[in-house]
Image (cartoon, coloured by chain):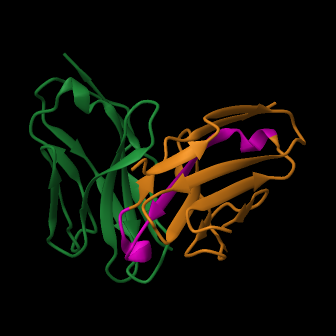
């Protein structure tokens, strides 16, 4: 069935470090892919998305490219800030379905 | 424009008690969802609705019931709470394109079942 696997955390980085959070997926057809972010005590917010192969989603300095050949959607940021500390979720929705599938989340802490 | 709101924010129940969680959205979205979030397991879909008067089961529906009597509201009920239902519950909505659209989440309801 459809599923998302993302790297386990927690991840701790120093401010201005480079961030990569790996995400791979299993799905039939051509799903849409998403990254959501959850700040402490809040609900999830959409960070970026990509709806077809080779699309790049970007927002707030974060980027992810939809790679169908490797079934991946890795999240990257060139220089993290303390304010980026949060839990990041990779998710997909099949092109023929109504249900989102979320990864288990990766906790990021950025220290000054 | 409040987006997605959830009531209550926090609740403590005893085993066997019942309660209803309320989700409301003011974005005229067709689709609404209930998830639970547990440590190490991410978000799991409980039930969802593709429109007023409709509901469908998600990944973990047992022990829960839902109703969508009005387009803007989606209720999640626990008839006889169990400790295994201790969790954080999130409601989400999407539209107008339906299931392929971005989901917008509420702030969550933290439930503790003793």
Q: Quadrant of residue B17?
A: top right
- Above or below, A21 relative to A86: below
Nearer the observer, B49 or B113: B49
In this image, A38 relative to A15: left or right? right
User: Does A21 appear above or below A100?
Assistant: above
Q: Is residue B108 left or right of residue B27?
A: right
Give percent across and percent down for residue A81.
17, 28
Which residue range is magenta in the image? B83-102
Q: Residue at x 43, y 83 (%)?
A: A96
In this view, which residue lies farthest toward the right?
B16
What color does chain A have in the rendering? green
Asked whether residue A13 appears in the rendered view, the answer is: no
| Image chain in orange | B
- Is residue B94 depicted above or below B106 in this figure? below
Q: Can you say which quadrant of the picture contains the C terminus of chain B?
A: top right
Queried whether the magenta region covers residue A105, the answer comes back as no
Q: Which of A25 and A83 lies nearest the eye of the viewer?
A: A83
Residue A27 percent coordinates (x, y): 40, 75
**Residue B86 drawn at (x, y percent):** 71, 38
Residue at left offset 68%, top offset 57% = B75
- Residue that appears at 75% across and 57% down: B64
**Camera-nearest residue between A98 and B94:** B94
Q: How many marks?
A: 0
Work out which residue is located at the far front of the displayed protein and give it: B1
Where is residue B100? Give x, y as percent. Answer: 38, 74
Whether B101 is among the magenta residues is yes
Q: Can residue B6 be spotted in the picture? A: yes
- Residue appearing at x 20%, y 68% in the figure: A67
- The quadrant holding residue A9 is top left
């Amino acid at each position: 069935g459809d599923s998302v696997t993302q790297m386990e955390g927690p991840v701790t980085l120093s401010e201005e470090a480079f961030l990569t959070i790996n995400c791979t997926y299993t799905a039939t057809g051509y799903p849409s892919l998403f990254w959501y972010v959850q700040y402490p005590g809040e609900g999830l917010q959409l960070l970026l998305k990509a709806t077809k192969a080779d699309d790049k989603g970007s927002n707030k300095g974060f980027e992810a490219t939809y790679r169908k050949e490797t079934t991946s959607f890795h999240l990257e940021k060139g220089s993290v800030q303390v304010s980026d500390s949060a839990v990041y979720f990779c998710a997909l929705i099949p092109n023929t379905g109504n249900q989102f599938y979320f990864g288990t989340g990766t906790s990021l802490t950025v220290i000054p | 424009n409040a987006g997605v709101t959830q009531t209550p924010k926090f609740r403590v129940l005893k085993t066997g008690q019942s309660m209803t969680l309320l989700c409301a959205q003011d974005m005229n979205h067709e689709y609404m969802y209930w998830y639970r979030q547990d440590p190490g397991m991410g978000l799991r879909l409980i039930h969802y609705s593709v429109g007023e008067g409709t509901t469908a089961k998600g990944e973990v529906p047992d022990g829960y019931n839902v109703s969508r009597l009005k387009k803007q509201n989606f209720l999640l009920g626990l008839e006889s709470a169990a400790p295994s239902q201790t969790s954080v519950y999130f409601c989400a909505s999407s539209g107008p394109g339906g299931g392929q659209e971005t989901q917008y989440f509420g702030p969550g309801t933290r439930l503790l079942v003793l």
